[in-house]
């Protein structure tokens, strides 16, 4: 018979612990995304391949930007920060997911679950605002090229990067603390492959609808404010590009901006689908599958999109891949 008892690993937190035949535990259980059928084993291999490709691609892009002096501009600095966030995001989720699948030990400690929520939301929110900063960079480069060094100075670039992380961290800390302050009971089985706040809240023993609405509003603001800035920037860019007399200049501007728009579409498309749908349209399967796109697939596509559609990145890559060239270490 299960008997809940109170337990508080952190001051001010009320947690309900499950007592089963005298054994107690405060761990959560991640049910995961895959089972051990043949098809799911193949899918697991595909996910690992995508993850390793993403780690290698983003690490290589960071090294290229760091080592090649031609890429020492605000645009590529922001791109390197995007790659760094993608690296950290994958490292936060995929190793634990893979270890759970391979070993069958799917438990995650209370503190570890809270830490995963915090890091995931910090990086996701930070990336959302960083994409807005990158759109401002493109707006200045296209619409005010002669004032680019003034309007997009290095101190401003650093402040935008730090501000993006701080805004993401504030959201992550708030949601992690609020989510884990609820009492939990039952078997503590999270129907997900990582600790995501909405999935954890389903295990609470009390009504969480008020916090659920507040979390929904917070997610909407974290997505819509940066997205509105991005759309405004690219609306102004489009108007400026259409006024350019040179066909080559228009092509170059479109090529540079289309890469960023592709990344924006991938990131915001998946995030809006998972966080801004009405609750009546949400299912547990969608809530588990869709996060794969912006936690695993999108981080792999980001360096590919920027490297394949950017002549400067391709030039730096060819330079270091040429026979006899020194590796960018």
Image (cartoon, rainbow, N blue to C red):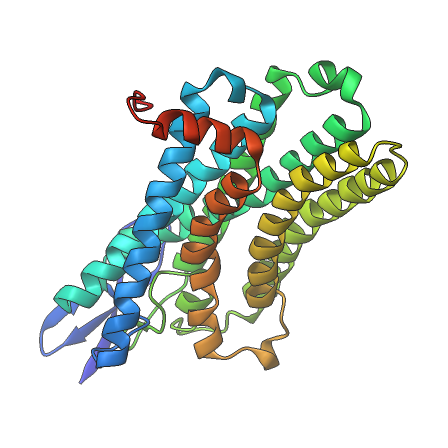
Residue sitting farthest toward the left: 22
241 lies left or right of 262: right
Residue sitting farthest toward the bottom: 1
Q: Position of residue 175 (x, y in %)?
A: 48, 53
In which quadrant will I find the C terminus? top left
Q: Position of residue 16 (x, y in %)?
A: 30, 67
92 lies left or right of 105: right
Nearer to me, 1 or 288: 288
Nearer to me, 191 or 101: 101
In this orientation, does residue 29 appear? Answer: no
Nearer to me, 85 or 56: 56
Nearer to me, 212 or 292: 292
Q: Which residue is found at the position 56% from the left and 71% from the top? A: 209
- Quarter of the image holding residue 56? top left
Q: Which residue is found at the position 44% from the left and 57% from the top? A: 297
Q: Which residue is found at the position 68% from the left and 30% from the top? A: 137
């Amino acid at each position: 018979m299960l008997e809940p008892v109170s337990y508080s690993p952190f001051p001010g937190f009320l947690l309900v612990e499950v007592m089963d035949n005298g054994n107690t535990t405060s761990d959560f259980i991640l049910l995961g995304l895959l089972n051990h059928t043949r098809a799911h084993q193949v899918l697991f291999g595909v996910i690992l391949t995508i993850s390793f490709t993403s780690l290698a691609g983003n690490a290589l892009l960071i090294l290229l930007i760091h080592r090649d002096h031609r890429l020492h501009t605000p645009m590529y600095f922001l791109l390197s920060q995007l790659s760094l966030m993608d690296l950290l995001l994958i490292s936060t989720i995929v190793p634990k997911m893979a270890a759970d699948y391979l070993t069958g030990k799917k438990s995650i400690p209370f503190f570890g679950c809270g830490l995963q929520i915090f890091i995931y939301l910090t990086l996701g929110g930070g990336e959302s605002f960083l994409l807005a900063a990158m759109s401002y960079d493109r707006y200045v480069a296209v619409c005010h090229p002669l004032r680019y060094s003034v309007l997009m100075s290095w101190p401003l670039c650093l402040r935008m990067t730090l501000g993006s992380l701080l805004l993401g961290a504030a959201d992550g800390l708030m949601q992690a603390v609020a989510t884990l302050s609820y009492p939990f009971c039952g078997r503590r089985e999270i129907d997900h492959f990582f600790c995501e706040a909405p999935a954890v809240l389903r295990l609470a023993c009390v009504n969480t609808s008020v916090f659920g609405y507040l979390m929904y509003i917070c997610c909407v603001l974290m997505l819509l404010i940066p997205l509105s800035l991005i759309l405004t920037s690219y609306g102004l860019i489009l108007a400026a590009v259409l006024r350019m007399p040179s066909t080559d200049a228009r092509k170059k501007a479109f090529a540079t901006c289309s890469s960023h728009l592709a990344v924006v579409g991938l990131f915001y498309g998946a995030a809006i689908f998972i966080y801004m749908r009405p609750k009546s349209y949400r299912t547990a399967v969608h809530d588990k599958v869709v996060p794969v796109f912006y936690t695993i697939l999108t981080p792999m596509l980001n360096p590919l999109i920027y490297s394949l559609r950017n002549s400067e990145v391709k030039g730096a890559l060819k330079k270091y891949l040429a026979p006899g060239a020194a590796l960018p270490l």
